[in-house]
Image (cartoon, rainbow, N blue to C red):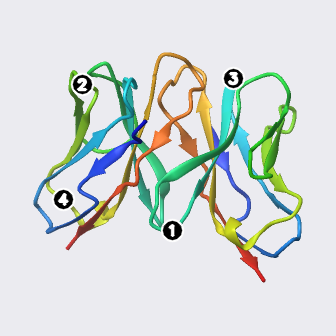
Amino acid sequence: AQSVTQLDSQVPVFEEAPVELRCNYSSSVSVYLFWYVQYPNQGLQLLLKYLSGSTLVESINGFEAEFNKSQTSFHLRKPSVHISDTAEYFCAVSFSGNTGKLIFGQGTTLQVKP
Amino acid sequence: KAGVTQTPRYLIKTRGQQVTLSCSPISGHRSVSWYQQTPGQGLQFLFEYFSETQRNKGNFPGRFSGRQFSNSRSEMNVSTLELGDSALYLCASSFGDREGETQYFGPGTRLLVL
């Protein structure tokens, strides 16, 4: 079965501390991996994605994620968070053969405290 | 380039009524995907249209339907509304002709069923 699991529903962290949001998937076919962020009362914005090639991908605002095929994971990390990073983060997977369809994890609320 | 737009942004209906939501994709995009977001079930894929044809479908009852016009604009319809249909409905667009493409999301339509 094809599924996506985000292991933490909420992650509280202090400003300037590092953070890791975990994402695991289950699939028997090739996958394309995404992290989206959702601010209150807004739609989803793409943070970063992995299609192929280097397993480490970075975003313009300091987030990075590493694709680990053996562990079927795509964890999101940031070495130093800001108050403005407070939002809900969704891991999403597109499975080969299903163009246009994203399967999302349940989401992780990142709460950055001063 | 204008982003994905959705109308209306907010909607209140009563049980048994029907509703139509509209989505205008980014210019040049031919794929439109629809998702339902609820606190309990998270983000769930409804269906995807590409060049006026439904190409992918999620596990929703037949009360949920959609269509796409020749200009790639898409509508989704929910008939015989139930309380559980209260949700944020998001649409996303992409070029749709390659696997792993980024989907760009609109701000959503928040539907409340009373």
The vertical placement of B87 against B101, above or below, is below
Residue A28 at least partly seen? no
**Marks 1, 4 in one chain:** no
What's the distance in space between the residues labelled 1 and 2, CA to CA?
31 Å
- What is the chain identity of the residue bearing mark 1? A
**Do the residues under discs 2 and 3 have CB atoms within 8 angstroms?**
no
Q: Secondary structure at mark 1?
A: loop
- Of tags 3 and 1, which is closer to the observer? 1
For the residue marked with disc 3, what is the amino acid? Ser
Residue, disc 4: B81
Q: Quadrant of residue B11?
A: bottom left
Q: Which mark is residue A30?
A: 3
Q: Which mark is residue A40?
A: 1
Q: Which mark is residue B98?
A: none
In what quadrant of the picture does the C terminus of chain A appear?
bottom right
**Marks 3, 1 in one chain:** yes
- Of tags 1 and 4, which is closer to the observer? 1
Q: Secondary structure at mark 3?
A: loop
- Sequence-wise first label, 4 or 2: 2
**Do the residues under discs 4 and 2 have CB atoms within 8 angstroms?**
no
Residue, disc 2: B71
What's the distance in space between the residues labelled 2 and 3, CA to CA?
32 Å
Which residue is located at x 57 percent, y 20 percent? Answer: B99
Give the crowd class for mark 1: few <14, some 14-19, many >=20 residues within 10 Å: few
For the residue marked with disc 4, what is the amino acid? Leu
What's the distance in space between the residues labelled 4 and 2, CA to CA?
28 Å
